[in-house]
Structures are given as C-alpha cells and as structure tokens.
Image (cartoon, helix red, strand yellow):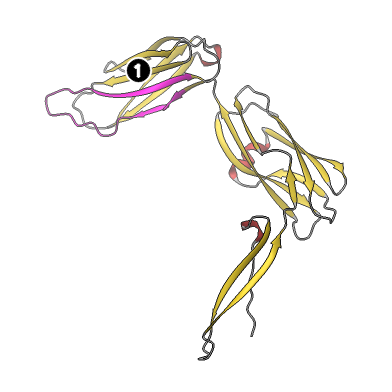
Amino acid sequence: GAIKATIDGKKLFPGMFEKNFTVSTNDPENKQFTLTVQGTVQRVFELSREMKWTGFTDDDLKLDVGITNLLTTPIHIKSVRWADDVRGKELEDRIGLKIETVEKGRKYLLKIWKKKELPPDNVTTNIILTTDFPKLPEKALSMSIVVQNDVQIYPDRLYFGEMLIPAGATKPFDRTFNIVAARGDSLKILKALPSRDDITVKIQELQPGKSFRGTIWIRPETRLGQYTGSVKIYTNYPKYKELVLDIVGS
C-alpha cells in the first residue's frame, strides 16, 4: 500500500523541518509504526521593509518596497493587484500599486501610493504578486493600513443599555467619553449642544489643547421604549468644526 503525506510550507518557518506520522495497522506484530518526513522550507522572496503604514487622513501614503528573489532559479514577477476580498476591492480605487523590474528575475520594486483621500479605518488585506514560477504562481503579501483622524472622539457612540426607573420617579444615568488631538496641542472645545432637554454635557480639559474628558448625564422620563439622542461638539479646528456623539439606550 501507500501513504500520502502533504506538507504545507506556508505554515512552517523557513529552514529544516521534521514531521512524524503514526500509522496504525491490523498487523498483530506491528500494530503501529512511525513515518518521519524531513525537508527544508525555502523563503522565496525577501522584502526590504514591513508592509505597514500608519498615518492621518491628509497624510501622503507612499511606500517603496524592495522584493528580492532568494532562489537560484530566476522568477519573473508579472503583475501586482489587491486581493479579491472586500477590503482589497475597497482599496483598488484609493491606493495605487505598481511593480518595477530592478534586475530581471532577481530584484523588483513594489510602489504603493495614495490616489484618493482615505477615510479613518484599520485595514488588513493582501497584495497579490503573480509570477512565472510554477511552484508559486501567486504570492500574497499581507498589508496593514491604519488611518486616523487628527481629532478623535471615543467612543463615538455611548450605550446606556437598559435604564431602570422606578414608577413615578426620575433617575440620572451617566457615561464618559474622551476627545484627543492626535497631533498638535491647539485644540479648543468651543461648545457642546445636546439634541434633547433631558441630556446634560460637561467637558473638562485634561491636557491643554491636547485631551479632554466629557461626561454625559441623561434623566429620561419613565416611558418605555428606545432612547436616542446626540451631542454636537464644536471645535476650533476647521476640518473638525463639528463632532457628533450618538447616544442610545432603552
């Protein structure tokens, strides 16, 4: 008979490996024996830098990544594209990709640049290289992109959950939030306007021009049902003149 063992090199670190398999049989004199598979996992490509970028919405995203073929066999990178998943498709129109040959079959340069402004997000997806190497027709490079607002409010929604109020009485409920200037220290909170009369808001400056702590109190009526509201926070930053903090509960 024959036993087929498959080793997935993508799940192993580069270098020597050894894997053991236990085989059970109906032979009374040899009920079990061990098969050992040894080999070497080779890294095909080496990158000149990590595939990560962190910045703000108005920053210029521009990365040049050197790709070196570590095998003795020449490998030609034919094209590059974003992965076909949802996040990859979202980035197609916003971030450009181009592969340039530095030394044919050996060295390449992957150019990544921003085509459109990126919304605040945390994205991890793959960039796919296609090659003429039969053992590796496609190579996936994991790419991580973190885009931040200059002014961040977190959480951007306050959940009060289920608010229990005794019949015929009123009761206040409170939650806190933070506002941070991610770069610079000239932020000022001009005013905060709640959308309902039963919402009160107070904002305290923790670090001058840098960070603020806010507290929301609500005193809802004893009426069953969903509770929704919001607070509009106005700042001196032209791009962030109005921040909206949503409030939900029941």
Determine the image quadrant of residue 244: top left
Name the side, left or right, on which 10 lies relative to 170.
right
Q: Secondary structure at mark 1?
A: loop
The foreground one among 184 and 95 is 184
Magenta stretch: residue 32 in it? no
The foreground one among 119 and 109 is 109
Q: Position of residue 207 (x, y in %)?
A: 44, 13
Q: Residue at x 66, y 32 (%)?
A: 94
In the rendered image, the residue lying farthest to the right is: 104
Magenta stretch: residue 163 in it? yes
* Mark 1 Cα shell of 10 Å, populated few (<14), some (14-19), many (≥20): some
Q: Residue at x 41, y 16 (%)?
A: 212
Q: Is residue 238 above or below residue 246?
A: above
Can you identify the residue that label 1 sits on? 195
Q: Which residues are magenta?
A: 153-180
In the rendered image, the residue lying farthest to the bottom is: 28
The foreground one among 92 and 235 is 235
Q: Is residue 57 above or below residue 63?
A: above
Q: Residue at x 80, y 48 (%)?
A: 77
The count of marks equals 1
